[in-house]
Amino acid sequence: MKHLPTVLLPSLVVLLNPTTTNAFQSTFLGKQHRLHHSTHSSSSSTTSLTMMFDQLSTAISGVTQSFTPRQRITEKNIAPALRDVRRALLDADVNINVADALIAGVKKRSVGTEVLKGVSADQQFIKAMYDELLDMMGGDSGADDAGAGPMGGSGSGIPVATLATATSASTPSVVLLAGLQGAGKTTAAAKLASFLKEREVDYDAVAALSEEERRGLITSRMPVRERKVLLVAADVYRPAAITQLEVLGKSVGVEVFSLGSEVDPVDIARGAVEKAVEEGFDTVIVDTAGRQVIDADLMDELKRIKNAVQPSETLLVVDAMTGQEAASLTASFDSAVGLTGAILTKLDGDSRGGAAVSVRGVSGKPIKFVGVGEKISDLEPFYPDRMASRILGMGDVISLVEKAATEVSDEDAMKMQQKMADASFDFDDFVKQARLVSKMGSFAGVAKMLPGMSGMMDNAKIKDLEKRIKRQEAMICSMTKKERANPELLIKDKTARSRLTRITKGSGTSFDDGMVFISEFQRMRTMMSRMSKQMGGGGAPGGDMEAAMAGGGGMEPPLGNRALRRQAKKKKKGGKGGGRGFGA
């Protein structure tokens, strides 16, 4: 899948907003690369953008903008930044003890260090923040591949915490789910069953691959275990809980074991394990009852179920929207019944992010999975390095590429890369790329995964973007097959104006809208070619983006962009060192 980043990132950034391309190119191809290189050598649809960590990311970005050039980081010159970061952490509902420990760790990593060559003080401060967040959430900043973190993932691609597997055919792995009412236990049980059945990576099989086979292999293309899972409906109190699990189980093709609502949950769990042994199920997921609050009856029932089935994993399902209370809840359940980890749900909500940062710091238990949407497939392993990268506004390129890999084949990616590089990208390709982005989630969610883009897109821009893409798709649907395959007919052909008039009338848009779209499309095609070559090594980095936006680079200027065309021509005539260059 080496072609995917080269294909996905240029098209994503120009689809999301052509006006942000310069900033993205600077951030992704410049600053982020220098930070990664220098620090490594020294030691991953709604229109709402009020998503998890937005407040925290924005605050931390504001802090780093106040840094001035300096050669050495001292306690005095970073005190204001640390104070602002602490305030941002508390505003994001991070536990106060965790926030203080985080600040102390960043201070220890930063104070007295020389600013590395090629890296600014604010970048080095962010690296210290990244390392401390990584350690706080269960990662290891001292690992050999930790330097890859700011670019969105560790070299191994293995999450810190994985689920236990069956030790033998007669001893299935039992996963006991606990939690309060409303946290999403039943849905999480079905999501987890689907994940273990279809998407859980078999890291033993990956380890057996040759080094050549493992190189460049992303998670979504790794061998999977394909467990045989049995869901257990042990919540006999909540109305329709059993029916809900049966419906969800049927939707994911997983059998659900139930004895009705009149049977003791302990007997249900015990009977399920016996069935699993007899019929060859290797994993049993027990969905237990919840309460509005922690009480003695809830804990007693959980203890009795745990003693009866001896689970390999006891996971607490917690709602991310409860903030730091999720961490306290994890600690309470752990002291009562003993936990092995947590599943954090509703990570795509509008909570402030304190739960993800606080859970391990308060309870000592790792987050093993996170719920990132309402679909059954929206459950992902928790990667501390990717989460730290998102919190710091660095995006999550690895997760973005993995999402795309489920939608794009290697062959299609290679064809698209070639089309982008030689600027033969057509209107059919545009529709394919737009639909690919929509399949990966909301435009807002995808934007957050692009490095440097989180502060550039607000609610108004996202809404405007979605309307613009709908208009553009409508215009493309009004084109003939020949026009979709050959954009030049609408750019420089003598019939371009009459064709565009027909298309805009047929799509219910104005002629001005059509002019703007054709201009943007041509600009987009040129920028895709330049960015694709830079990222893929096919062109010189630092190409003239202004000329690209004006239609330069050997291509016809786009329709209706007079000011930019004039500027490009002037630059061409008056530029120094033209021709073949000095001494050629």
Image (cartoon, helix red, strand yellow):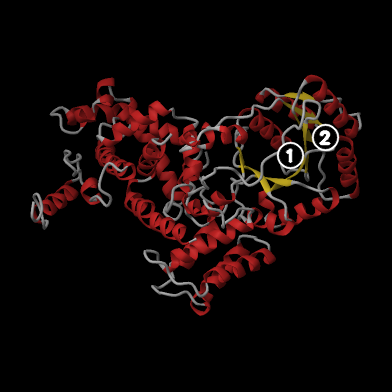
Viewer-proximal residue, 255 or 70? Answer: 70
Q: Is residue 385 left or right of residue 247?
A: left
Residue at 51% over, 71% down = 81
Q: Residue furthest bottom?
A: 76
Residue 538's x, y, as percent? 27, 41
Residue 79's x, y, as percent? 53, 76
Secondary structure state at the residue bearing disc 2: loop
Q: Is residue 276 left or right of residue 471?
A: right
Residue 168's x, y, as percent? 77, 29
Is the N terminus in the top left, top right, bottom left or bottom right quadrant? top left
Viewer-proximal residue, 190 or 467? Answer: 190
Secondary structure state at the residue bearing disc 1: helix
Residue 80's x, y, as percent? 52, 75
Q: Which residue is mark 2?
A: 235
From mark 2 to mark 1, how far is it between C-alphas?
Answer: 10 Å
Q: Amino acid at mark 1?
A: Lys
Cβ atoms under marks 2 and 1 closer than 8 Å? yes
Q: Which residue is mark 1?
A: 185
Viewer-proximal residue, 350 or 179? Answer: 179
Q: Amino acid at mark 2?
A: Asp
Above/below status of 289 relative to 388: above
Q: Residues within 10 Å of mark 1 (few under 14, many from 20)?
A: many
